[in-house]
Amino acid sequence: MVTRIFLCNEQTEPEIRDFIREAIADISEGEQYIVTWNCGNIQTLKVGDRAYFKRIGSANQGYFASGVVVPADREYQLKLRSARYRELSEAYDIDSQANNFRVWVAWSACTSFDETLRNDYLRQLPSFQGMPLEPQSDAGVFREEYVQMLDREWERHTQKAIRAGKGISLIEVYYRWGLEDIQQGFPQDALESFRQALKLNPEFIKAYLGLGDAHVSLREYGKAVGDYGKAIAMRPDKARLAYYKRGEINLLLGQYQQAMADFQAVIEIDPNYVDAHFALGNAYFKLKSYEQAIACYSRVLELSPDRDLAAFRRGRSHYILKEYPEAIRDFSHAIELQPSNVEAYYYRGLTYAQPSVADETLAGDDLRKSIILFQTQGKPDKAKRAKEFLATLAIDSLPKTTPKSIHAIAASEDIATATTKEAIATPIATPMSSDDVDEETSPLIITTDTISTDGVIAASQEAITNAEDNNAIAETIEKIVEVEKIVEVEKIIEVEKIVEIEKIVEVEKIVEVEKLVEIEKLVEVEKVVDRVVEKVVDRVVEKVIEKPVPFSIEDPSTAEKLAMISVMAQYMRDGWMVRSVDKSQVGYDLECHKDDLREAVVIKSLTSDRESFAISAIEIENARTNKDFVLWVVSGSAENPELRCLRGRELFEQFDLDPLAFAAKVKQTTVQLEFVAVALEMPQ
């Protein structure tokens, strides 16, 4: 098939701007736009010939549309109407006249008639030197050796026009649909969209990358490698992303040599590609080439000093090489960058415990901290491993010297109280993905396998002496976390003298607490031998958990709190950093961050007795103008809440806007009604 140039002069085609508007509307719906066009006396056009449309005349001469010659509907095919034209292709229309034929052409991309790919621009390009760009005849053949360069410049031009809102491309529409399907969890639909794009342009590299991503979502890794390979074969000098994605798959499959080759190819194309240096370091680490891994991680930290995982991985490499001072330096740096990096605490504790370092107090501090974080992040196996190693350290469980960390268990009343208060009041860290390949982000779960009697009494003393603090603690816990399992004490602790509570209470009996809190259901103290301790524990429980669970979803205030908890837990499970903000100031409830992503989150609850919720004017303005705006609507029971996520203007598409109230505020000389709040209702 050949590439032909159709000419358009606005003087002879006054409706051309209307054609372009219609084309944009059709293409945006995923349909080609069919036009019939004059081709002069040329009778050699074939179905499948590629077509460019060029503006001629006094100004802005250049290309404004592209497509392909298609067959006319049978009732309009000239060859079926007259034996004289039997040799013509199915593209010719019966509207043709003697020596002035018309054919059907389907547009797949176009720009504004005033935003053409101009001749004077092409003439300046070295690749078009010597190419005659002036029109010769309608539907004339474009010289084959220049077609690929024209295609490339046209693709760049349409991309620029699309960003400016002055053009459209059916290929880009299909590609965008594919990306949206992957994001929304429909990889099979995404495959079809990317294949449609490739039918229009078999050399559309981004579509092959999209196919690879869809196959990864389906865990069809072999097909994904093939898709990325096709993109690489087309433009090996520009395919850094395809190399990187293929390298990630090879690394996942344990094909480390192939992965290294891909990452090195990325670095050859772009020496400052940070992710490629980090991934190459991971491949060296897996191959136990720790010196090379250290070099890669060091390069990552040069290019991006805030990469805590690079610092941690470099520390791991130094640790394996028994370079303990360097390992401690890197683990400490990783913790400074990301305080919830539990693996860094754990391995720094192991490093402090090495004979050549032998700082058992600091080792104990780090291991205890790692146990708390492992439990908080729902990793009981790793918490158990840290406990077992902690038990091997040659240190007393109650050191007599002043500890170097507040996480150490102290003998004095003040230190015990501070330790217990910290364990209760420390904000829950957002679950972070470990750098280990087999690590998975766990749901937000708070577990504590063992709480010593010292901790219970210290917490009780704090509850008695400072009720306001406990109220603050209760409010914080009620807003942030859904407590699933708090305490199971399986041992009998022998206590001689725990702590004096206001110099009155002295406990000398054995305490056995079997179940303090059951998951989301009830608060129950099964057995407390000493009556005084039982009274103190009950008072703490009453202040920390003010009402039994499950809550009633019909209570609006409770429904709002449960909706907040459900949405925060969803983000935390996915590795987001979550911060509560005052929505009266900014127009949303939460700020959520993950890598370079940001979302401004508004949370609304729907109870069974109503199908609407109130929304403020500033929240509606955010929905219209803030690209990061996200609305979560939570409905259903407390045990099985249903979460719906709406982004941007989807709010106005799925809900009806019904004003609830207006506020009249007097200005200087006039009175103006100011919109306050509206209710959004589901359309019937």
Image (spheres, rainbow, N blue to C red):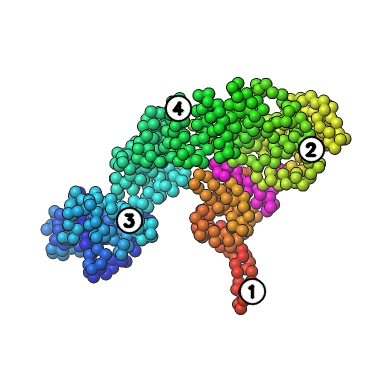
Q: Percent x, y for residue 254?
A: 42, 28
Relative placement, left or right, of 285 versus 366 is: left
Q: Which mark is residue 666?
A: 1
Q: For residue 112, what is the image quadrant?
A: bottom left
Q: Of the two numbered discs 1 and 2 on the same chain, state the one appearing first in sequence.
A: 2
Residue type (three-letter) at the residue carrying disc 4: Glu
Q: For residue 53, what is the image quadrant?
A: bottom left
In magenta stretch: residue 322: no
Q: Percent x, y for residue 170?
A: 34, 53
Question: Which residue shows up at 67% across the image and 40% down it?
Answer: 426
Q: Which mark is residue 20?
A: none
Q: Are marks 3 and 2 in contact (CB under 8 Å)?
A: no
User: How many residues crowd around disc 4 within 10 Å: few (fewer than 14), some, or many (20 or more)?
Assistant: some
The CA span between labels 2 and 4 is: 52 Å
Residue type (three-letter) at the residue carrying disc 2: Ser
Q: Are marks 1 and 3 in contact (CB under 8 Å)?
A: no
Q: Is residue 267 above or below residue 256?
A: below
